[in-house]
Amino acid sequence: MGRPFSSFFPSLWVTFFFFFFTSFMCLFVSADDPNRLTPINRDLYHSSVDLMKEIEALVHRHSDKLTIETMKSKNKGYAAEIPVVTYRHGRNNIDDTSKFRILLSFGQHGRELITTEVALRILLILSEEHLLPHMDRASLNNTLAKLVIKVVPMENLNGRRLVEGGDLCERRNGRGVDLNRNWSVDWGKKEKDYDPYEENPGFAPFSEPETQIMRKLALRFDPHIWVNVHSGMEALFMPYDHKNITPDGEISQQMKLLLEELNILHCHSRCMIGSGGGSVGYLAHGTATDFMFDKARVPMAFTFEIYGDEAATSKDCFRMFNPTDPNTFDRVLGDWSAAFFTIFKMGPEYLDETEFRPKSNIDKLVSIDEYLEGYLIERSSRYGKKREVFDLGMQEMRTYFRLFLLSSVLLMFMFCSRISKNKFTRPLVSAISI
Ligand SMILES: [Zn+2]
């Protein structure tokens, strides 16, 4: 009874498996459907209103350590306000000039919600409502006693409101200006790949109330360390953003050393390190970090990129810039809040260094070629995973079926993924982070 059926076996089964695996593969490819946009995960992320309420309540509960002020500015009918939280160890000591001063800004780009959650976590740790694992509190208190830390938890409140209203890809302020292109160093210069939607620098340097407030804050506070916190990739950048070199001098070496240390301790050695302009793949003009270093003379000025999902399609901005699952969300908050406490401890030590300490990997800065290579390897390994799934399914088939089907399936898969890539792959430059 089996004989007559087995004579049809090759052609029937070939057809069956061919269609089965082709449909299976196309399902995989369509999992990257660019039209499927990930919404804000409200279970993980605070709304801007709730985040600020929580921070205000926290400051109220810890008025011995924390204070908050709201800085306001207005220009041509457009108003902005920026809350600034100050951590000072000891209520009576308000003389900031004798202390080591650190200024941190989060949420300069509206769509990078994860950065504002990191700001809240840092404030929770500073107020001892959240404990940092493996951190000796006595030693931490000793470190913090020498510091004044100012945290801007949400620099771009108006832009953030647009994101929360559904414009998940908005990075600019409430009237369409990129706050990280509105500063005066090399302002307004446009590269060949200039994207007017993403990088509108405004009608003049400091045209925007938000930038005016931040400049005033920085010049008044005169920090030793500035960190502008972003998301979109994993990187630790130092000046310059507008040219692909790092500054000369010993301080530049110290900045590199500190970033190397942070990369190992908190970024699982995955972060790109170097000048923003030399590493990210595009030059950025009129950025905050270049101003802080060049004009405000902040000795150590950085831009951190704390998270990015390269697998997200260009329109799926919430996923591209923010962790979407609880595990990754917690991991990013844990890693990066710890990174800032390492800066609080080591920053003053690095800045006090007068003697140059050579380190073999100090000049090992990642070039754009290396970045592209890593990007391509990661892409191929993603597709490789899918191939493994198919291989497993084929192990039980006869050898000639396996060979025939595998080649058909791979051909179809390459065909599908090529169409998918052509349609949806975003160019590197469009994923503008800093
Ligand atoms: Zn950004």
Image: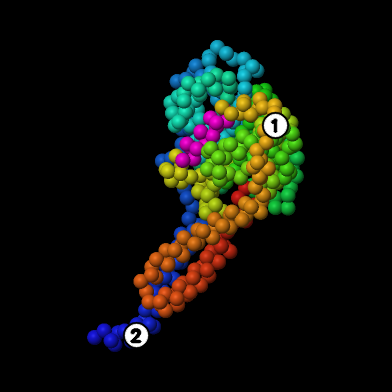
Magenta residue check for 101: no
Q: Is disc 1 placed on a helix, strand or loop?
A: loop
Identify the residue shown where x is 53% and y is 38%: 266
Q: Is mark 1 within 8 Å of ligand 1?
A: no
Report the residue that reaches farthest toward the left. Answer: 1
Q: Which residue is mark 2?
A: 8
Q: Earlier in the sequence, mark 2 or mark 1?
A: 2
Which residue: 55% across, 40% down? 264
Q: Where is residue 357? Give x, y as percent.
A: 67, 33
Q: Position of residue 217 (x, y in %)?
A: 65, 26
- Pointers 2 and 1 in contact (C-beta within 8 Å): no
Please give the residue where the numbered disc 1 appears in the rendered image.
356
Residue 202's label in the rendered image is: none
Locate residue 326: give its quadrant: top left
> Which secondary structure class fits the magenta region best?
helix
- Whether residue 284 is visible to the viewer of this picture, yes or no, is no
Write down the quadrant of residue 254 in the picture.
top right
Between circles 2 and 1, the one closer to the viewer is 1
- Quadrant of the image containing the C terminus: top right
Query: In the picture provided, is 346 more to the left or to the right than 289?
Result: left
Look at the image and give the residue range highlighted in magenta.
Answer: 331-344
The three-letter amino acid code for the residue at tag 2 is Phe
Assess mark 2: CB under 8 A from ligand 1?
no
Q: What crowding class fits label 1: few (fewer than 14 Cα within 10 Å), some (14-19), or many (20 or more)?
A: few
Determine whether the residue tagged by mark 2 lies in a helix, strand or loop: helix
Residue that appears at 56% across and 62% down: 421
